[in-house]
Amino acid sequence: MTKTSNGRSADVTRRQAMQGLTAATAVTALASGAVAQPVKPAAGPGASLHGASFYRFKLGDKQITILADGASLFPGAEVFAVNADPAQFKAVQARAFEPETSVNFHMNTVLVEEGNRRILVDAGAGHFCGEGFGRQALALKNAGIDAASIDTIVITHGHPDHFAGLLGPDLKPRFPNAKIVWDEREWAYWSTPGAIADLQRSKIPPAFVETFSKAIRAVLPATAARNEYVSGQTEIAPGVTFLPAPGHTPHSAVVLVTAGDKQLLVASDTTVLVQQNALHPEWITVFEMDAQQLVATRRRLLDRAAADKILWLGYHAPFPALGHIRATTTAWEFVPVSWRW
């Protein structure tokens, strides 16, 4: 191992350079709109379990399946913790054994099953967000779930990594028999030209703005005929409740799943970086449309989850993205579940 002039090992500096390069490449891929190419599972008994990208468990009388939509390294504090002290952000990342200048960015959707009802919370990024994403179709296949059997899709908010997977790479519907549930005000905002104009005036990096705009123009008009709208807290099905969680977008939402005395909060982007946002609920991303409101929403839901022992599912947390929220003397802590076969 060689040393650089400042005493740091050459291996360390090379590693950090590669991390930065990987994160920059991920943003470039977003701008290109490259079609994801999922790896096909190998043939043979049990072969599809390797990298199957689904995690299934029981919540009372409901079956929950977490479906990974992919992952990639993205830029760090400059996108996902814009008001954090850089040294503090690096320290939090190092404590979690994560890269100091980039984030391990996942996407995870959730299927809730009870009887013959199948409700999908968010549709993933589809082919719009680069090669690291758009893997939900493979996860469904490996889990033995026919997309045509899904009867309801709940969209938590109008960012395309949550709705763009409604269409396949051929721009045809992936879920032909599903109604699509939106908050009526969230849909009204994103389906107007003003939404793209707002994106262009925002501090969101241009690569993301371009990706968002492409997906909005392609997907929303093509799927509108199957939309159903809710306003405020609404029970979508027994034990599946749509809850307003504004701030990240004007009328973003979360979904609370209840089965007896068990609860799961599908928290969407209330915590984009779950471990970091639990420790530092004040940290915000460039994507928040009302940062003050988002922080208030986050604190309220984290407090509720800790007090009521509600399982927390973070859309962008490392797969399977499921954990508990524990209160600390200053904030909260995200404790991942132990994997159960």
Image: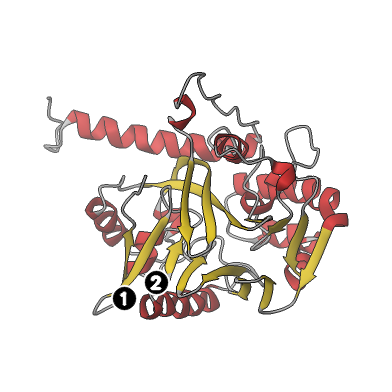
Q: Residue at x 78, y 32 (%)?
A: 170
List x then y, in percent, for residue 87: 26, 58
**Left or right: 61 with respect to 8?**
right
Q: Quarter holding the C terminus?
A: top left
Q: Nearer the viewer, residue 168 or 43?
A: 43
Q: Nearer the viewer, residue 172 or 98?
A: 172
Q: Is residue 336 left or right of residue 224?
A: left
Q: Would you identify the image quadrant in which residue 268 lies?
A: bottom right
Residue under circle 1? 331
In 3D space, how far apart are the residues under numbered discs 1 and 2 (Cα atoms)? 7 Å
Residue 2 visible in the current orientation:
yes
Residue 27 percent coordinates (x, y): 54, 40
Q: Is residue 192 visible in this depiction of the protein?
A: no
x and y, in percent, of residue 114 in the image? 61, 59
Image location (x, y in percent) of residue 224 = 84, 56
Tag 1–tag 2 contact (CB < 8 Å): yes
Q: Amino acid at mark 1?
A: Ala
